[in-house]
Image (cartoon, grey):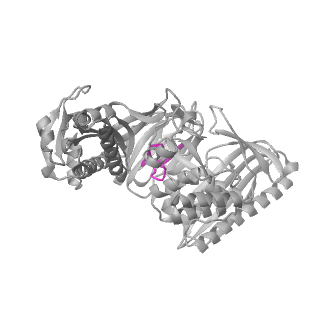
Amino acid sequence: MAREIVLEQVVQCESDLSAIWKGLSDTDWVNRAMGNERLKVEPATSPQSAARYLVKTRLGGFEVAWTERPYEFDFMRSLKVRRDMVSGPVERLDVGYFTEARGANSTVRVRLSLWPRSSLMAPVVRLSASMTLNKLVAAIGTLDQALLDARGGRPLLLPPAHPVNRERLERAAVALDESGQGALGRRLVDFVATAPDDHVMRMRPYELADEWGADRRALLCACLLGVRAGLLQLRWEVVCPSCRTGSEAADSLSELSTHGGCQLCDIRFGLELDQALEVTFRPLEAIRHLEVGPFCVGSPGRMPHVVSQAIVSPAGRAVLTVPDEVGLFRLFLRGGTVALVQSEAGAATSVELSDGRWPERLTVAPSATIAVSASDSAPERHVKLERAAWTNLAATARDVMLLPLFRREFSAQVLRPGLSLQVQRIALVFSDLVGSTDLYTHAGDAEAFRFVQAHFEVLTRAIERHGGVVVKTMGDAVMAVFPDELAGVAGARDMLTDFETFRLGDALGERTSLKVGVHGGPGFVATANKVLDYFGQTVNVAARLQGEAKAGQLVVAESVANEAVANGLVAAAQITERYPARLKGVEAPMPVVRVQVCARPAAVRATG
């Protein structure tokens, strides 16, 4: 191997450091802006190397391949990567960015280090590296100017690489407008038509909604309607719980299995609907062809929750820096070793850890350093410090399944038979129409059926008003799911009050009333009778609590009722009884309350 060639240049930027870092750390965009070609990526499985991928592409006119290590970076300070080349004129390439704040401006120092395979190739390698450095510097300058022009907004730097099919786009726009989407739908169409490839190849509706100042749920619905209009394609992405990037994607729920895996983090994980499955969108191929990529592997900008990452070599030592803030972080070593890190004032300013012998939790001061050492026999692996809070920018599978629009328009999206996926938190509501049997006896089947169907419509409106959705109806009963217990209580309250108004206005309502049970917790989703359904103990308890209720009541766990009262969802005076309920299938008595939302009709009191 010939002597190292080092090229370096300093770029003075007018934008502030945080904005420059956000763009610079999106290395997929940087490579696109430089005009680099797409990468061909294969898993690299050497257990002794930190490299997780084998990458092939063209650089500087040469066909090259290298093993890709994870980026090493320290948030808003430095970012670097080492590439061991397996073909081409260079044996090793290191790329580094080093950033500093300069008042309201910033400085980026770009450094390329190359080791030619032979001295004869050194002049060619130096020339090629100089051209690459110039492209990098130009990309940083373009980023800086775009940030200045947008005054800190997200820059739209690259035009679409391929022309948009205007005829198909207009047809989709008309269909979306006819679905009632108005200005939001038109903005979505314009975005699909004009945004750069890297901005539309993985459209995250919540992230877009925040950028546009739009309602998240409304934009998620607009994207789903965009699928129906022939504008967008829906994708189910399996998201790694550590790096939180999509490790695989599917067009249909039926393609999923119970577990996912991440090549980068070297872990396997269960597909939880509220964390491990995210819904994203991209333009339909008939509307717009995309240069999907990838153009980079493991871009730090796509993992904004990771604040520091380094590689630990055998018998080596890596140092990570905790952000200058109080909070909860997580230390992760490739393969799954983890420790929670609490940052609080007055704690230790440095910590030394040995590979494989970590405490479950440690406390350090803001800006503290955490050093991780490895033994001689340990493989080369990356270690990272990440924010413990789960990102709220993901439209999860749970969120989508709570949309009435999804259940109505995407009923074909079901899990394959026999597969059930867990959801960490949901609330189930069961209702029962009191007096319905008597109604059929006295009013006749046709009139009783009309009343029951009309009451379903009343309850459905109340359920959807509070973010819930009807899962199914069973005879005269409703099973609905809500995002949490308080939403479930609010929905159940309105179900009772709205039904009361409805029954008083119907000649058949005199002998009827409604009762409801609410319960929250983990559950499972599976396909039953060709639709998505919920199963598990949370569902069972919710059904049992409905059985505990009397006419005009909802029954709920005492702790949830207390929280509902504190939030003004029900009045304390409406709680008529607190007692330990003995529920079938539940070992210990459960503290519950009866909430009398509506007075019991006289006819119902007389019949029980």
| Residue 22 part of the magenta segment | no
Task: Return the x and y of residue 486 as percentages of the image width and height.
Answer: 29, 48
The quadrant holding residue 340 is top left
Place residue 76 in its image quadrant.
Answer: bottom right
- The one of 118 and 527 positioned closer to us in this rendering: 527
x and y percent of residue 422 in the render? 43, 35
Residue 429: tell me if it is visible. no
Q: Is residue 253 above or below residue 293?
A: above
Which quadrant, please, contains the N terminus?
A: top right
Q: Nearer the viewer, residue 15 or 316?
A: 15
> Is there any visible trace of residue 603 in the rendered image?
yes
In the image, what residue occupies the spot 84% across and 52% down?
61
Q: Is residue 237 above or below residue 194?
A: above
Residue 443 left/right relative to 212 = left
Does the magenta run of residues contain 391? yes
Query: Which stretch appears magenta?
Result: 383-398
**Frontmost residue, 504 versus 415:** 504
* Image side of residue 566 versus residue 474, left or right: left
Q: Is residue 12 left or right of residue 305?
A: right
Picture coordinates of residue 71, whole percent (x, y): 61, 48
Residue 440 horizontal side relative to residue 190, left or right: left
Image coords of residue 585 (percent x, y): 26, 25
Q: Nearer the viewer, residue 493 or 46?
A: 493
* Quarter of the picture holding the C terminus: top left
* Residue 283 against residue 432 in the figure, above or below: below
Q: Residue furthest right?
A: 120
Q: How many marks?
A: 0
